[in-house]
Amino acid sequence: MDAPDSKSLPENAYRPLAPGEVYRPVVPPASTPPETTARSIVWGLFLCAVFTAASAYSGLKVGQVMEAAIPISILAIGLARVYSRRSSLLENVIITGIGGVSGAVVAGAIFTLPALYILKLDPKPWQTIFICLAGACLGILFLIPLRRYFVRDMHGQFPYPEATAITEVLITGEKGGSQAKLLLEATGIAAIYDFFVTTFQVWRETVDFQFIPAMKEVADKARVVLRIDAIGFILGLGYVMGLRASTLLCAGGVLSNFVLVPLVWKIGQHVPAPIYPAPMPISEMSAALIYRWYVRYVGVGAIATAGIFGILKSLRIIVGSFSIAAKAFRHGEGEGLERTDRDIAITRILVGVVVSAVAVAIFLGNLGATSVVLLIGLALVLVFSFFFTSVAANAIATTARNPVSGMTMLTIIISSVILLEFGVSGRTGMFFVMAIAGMVCTALSVSGQTITDLKTGYWLGSTPAAQERVKFYGGIVSAVVVGLVIVALAQTFQFGEAAPGDARPVLVSPQASIMKALVEGFMSRQPVPWVLFGTGAAVAVIMEMLGVPALIVALGMYLPLELNSGALVGGFIAHFVAKRSERVGGAAGASMRERAVIIASGLMAGGALGGLFGAALRLFGWYREDRIKLPFYDNDPVSQIVSCAGFVALCLYLWFGAMKKERPA
């Protein structure tokens, strides 16, 4: 068995480059180590199929999609040692990239396709597969021209939390030694901690401080609630994001939960009747319900508007990417381009888009649409997929959170409003809109996962064209598997709620149930909450005028506050570690930063593994949260205090682990 190479990420891997400075990846552009081998492709496709099937079931059962990329990167390290020729670093990148497609396609599928069954529209198996496959292909194709901007040109400007964790796992696995031990230690701690906290009733995962009388009184009278998700994954995520990004994200959460929610409560608490779009009076709502029925729509409007600004800002870069690709094609694909900067040829991208568009048009035509409606539907799929690709890439690069549900809701709303104007309604209209939403949702999800994979490859020295090609393999396998799994589950389960007289067990399918309610409401010509969307748009415009990254704030408005506040703690630790390492300076200071990133990446990896194991247990009939229940769990003050203590212990582990001095060899 070959000895592992001694590899390290360059010192400028995570920071902006100085004028004239060039980033050189771990594997130099001139090298051509094994990459897209039969070994890497077969293992990648196998893991993709396995994680797709498992994620589809768990997502429909509990609304939790297994994050596949980080666990698969850890598996790739283990598989590398099975062969007499140890798998190369770039082969492990390919395995991770193919396998990671599974979670992205599943997220797109379970948000939309079960709604077709809830609405009793009974899609055929080939229709479910096609919707996922078309969305996956469009997401990859539309993302490729953006690669140079998001991955190379903006080097050091985005934190890429998930890509950082994957990269650290792969590179530390290659290096071995004390750093590998540190990564495994942090991964093990977070995996055990997050597994028990999120799977069983040991102590509270989310702390809301309601056991403090003053906090309880503020929550009751003004609907102001502070929440923190006290787990290792969120802490590691916040550290990798850094203080600026986590602060902006939390600022959006503060605006939503400490300003907008109390404002809605103050205005509407004396109105006895429900105010659209909520089904109940505001006076009967908790802070969480006010957020769900009103403020979340404000967040959707802010995300959409911030996405428009992002598109406008990156238009020049997009055009430049197409120009570079066209020049490379005219003069030979490899001429003037290093291996690590070579994408799929522009003509192949264009052919892929045309073929995908024709296939989508044929699919929509089979739904009984007129030629005009068919063209409108096709335009909606292509425009939304391209538009949201940039939004997804920006969101993933900044916060590792893809606003899939918000953008899917926006797609359903706009598509419904437009198609209603052309007389499309009823059961045909519902199928038409959900098919469009399914393709767009999958494209959005897959493009976000693809930019993570391409950034990982950029840091390590992969060939972008090779990574892009194998993404299509993973998309095909995942689309087929998730389509067949959903069809099979629909035969033995009910999605959403139990129907009278139907004895089959129920899979809750929470996201698809929301989408079903939306499309059913709009196809029944209910009004659109334009005031809420417009309020979010105004917030995004104000952020841009102030020079603040609007998309990060908008994401904070949309995401649950507990995620934002927990990440902010990690951001502060990152800030203090950076300050301490600057004062120490030299090799010791660099070691602090490196150890902190490894620990934070381990917390993310371990948290993902813990969540994966917890989701897997929920697939068994014998599982119950109270299988493991500590005596004080139902005592809210004690349970939350223990949770706070555990989170503080994780923070101290991250801090002192970074400060620990390396022992001389």
Image: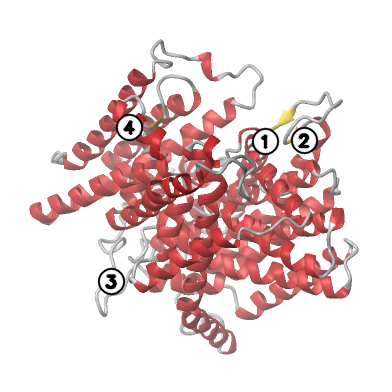
Which residue is tagged 3? 17
What is the x, y in percent for residue 547?
33, 71
- The colour scheme used here is secondary structure
Dots 1, 4 in contact, CB < 8 A: no
In the structure shown, which secondary structural element does the residue marked by tag 2 occupy? helix
Q: Amino acid at mark 2?
A: Leu
> For the residue carrying disc 1, how many other residues have a C-alpha within 10 Å: few (<14), some (14-19), or many (20+)?
many
Which residue is tagged 1? 57
Which residue is tagged 2? 489
Residue 539 seen in this snapshot: yes
Q: Would residue 619 be found to the left or right of residue 244 on screen? A: right
Question: Marks 1 and 2, Cα distance to the nearest angstrom?
Answer: 8 Å
Earlier-in-chain disc, 4 versus 3: 3
Q: Quarter of the image for the N terminus: give it.
A: top left
Which residue is tagged 4? 215
Question: Marks 1 and 4, Cα distance to the nearest angstrom?
Answer: 38 Å
Q: Which mark is residue 649?
A: none
Earlier-in-chain disc, 2 versus 3: 3
Instruction: From the viewer's side, name the closer residue of 253 and 112.
Output: 253
Question: Marks 1 and 3, Cα distance to the nearest angstrom?
Answer: 44 Å
Dots 4, 3 in contact, CB < 8 A: no
